[in-house]
Image (cartoon, helix red, strand yellow):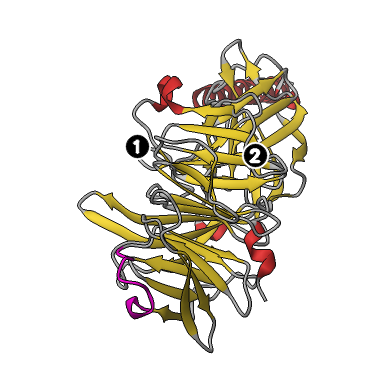
Amino acid sequence: MKNKNTINHSVSFSKLFRKGFLSSLIIFIILILNGCVDFEEPGTIYESSYPETNGPSITEITPAGEALGGVREIRISGQNLGVKNGSDTDWVYIGGRRAVIKEIIGNQTIVVYRPQLANSNYDTKIYISVTAPNAIDTSSNIEYVVESPGEVVGDYGNVFNELMALDFDNQENIYIVSNRAVYRNDPIGISFSQILTTLNLPVAYRRITDARFGPGTPGLNLYTANGTNIINRVRVDTAATSTRPIAVDTLPAPVIKLEFNENGDLYAGGNDGIFLVNGGPQSLGFAGLNIKTIRIFNGYMYVADSLNVWKSPISSDGSLGVSEPLVNISGNPDLSGCLISSIELDIDGSIYICLRNHPQYSLFFRESDGSITPYYYDQNILPRTVEQLTFGRDGHLYLISSSLRVGTQWQAGRVFRMNLNRNGAPYYGRQFLN
């Protein structure tokens, strides 16, 4: 019995030992595991004012689906957008490029400026992402397409040193004036040829300052000014080139800019004022100004000099009514020292302004409140060496670099076609082309 009891006690003690050992081992393992979890936990990387399940959420993009060329701003709508913790603002990425935020409206809308994208990210599906600051895993993404802002369609620096003027026929072939010669290129910038040489022009033509298509039979009639009181009409086509003066020694002063109205009446301007050439000439005022552009649209004449833009109603007899000032660069501290070199109008009468000596931008826009702002806030989207603006056809605005210096180099004769997807105000002279 003794041995049996001894054995039984031994078995009981052994069982208790094993149970105690296993319990201790389990507790030890739990402690170790808990210690490991505490050691590896990264901690909170962003202390949001709302739970992570309520992070940014995009529900709508405006414009929907695609930002065509010329779109300046993109509006993002959704939930839990905007300001958090009183100061932090969601980051917005378009095609991997962080966009500059223009405006935050409540917590449901963010408006951003269009950024420059990598060339491979234009005209293809990319993502717009809204990401909480310092919490890159808390974001919302939506597919989107951004159209290319445009492309260079002519780079003529190896052909001539200075591009003076540019106009288009009805097929959007480009007619380029340099000094006393005229060249033609096709709409995509491949077929380039010289169609008018200095031999076709009078000796008085030292330097053509403007070229505009206008009425006349037959063919394509390009009217040219050269800083004298002579205006020539030049026929330009593939069959022949010829010149015939239409106003010799009849203008009272030199002119450098030309424009036609819908009736084919010719207007010309220079430092001594603007003149109605047909049936005159008739002086219309604006003497003493450095005229940069004359545009006629919807019964009004728009005139730009180096610092100002005016709008004047045209009377039935061709005279001008009281001028309305639209732009005064000298009154804008942000544009101090800048000079207007060209303006253009779109079909809605909005004004596009070229400030050739601005350090960051070349193309500006007159807003509905009269303020002047860069067309795109990302200064890398458009070329910065632009000096002239001309609307072509089919929603394209052409940005022309004539002879501007970039560092120690001159960029001459470069033509950039901007995909504005908005038609320009009609240039009435083209309606007379055959």
Residue drawn 68% across the image and 51% down it: 422
Q: CA distance from mark 2 to mark 1?
A: 24 Å
Marks 2 and 1 in Cβ contact (< 8 Å) = no
Count of marks placed on residues: 2
Which dot marks residue 350? 2
Residue 200 painted magenta: yes
| The one of 68 and 8 positioned closer to us in this rendering | 68
Residue 323 painted magenta: no
Q: In the picture, which quadrant includes the N terminus? A: top right
| The one of 405 and 345 positioned closer to us in this rendering | 345
| Other-residue count near label 1 (Cα within 10 Å), few / some / many at <14 / 14–19 / ≥20 | few
Residue 187 visible in the picture: no
Q: Mark 2 or mark 1: which is in front?
A: 2
Magenta span covers which residues?
Answer: 197-206
Which dot marks residue 359? 1
Residue 425 visible in the picture: yes
Q: Give the SS element for disc 1.
A: loop
As drawn, 355 above or below 156: above
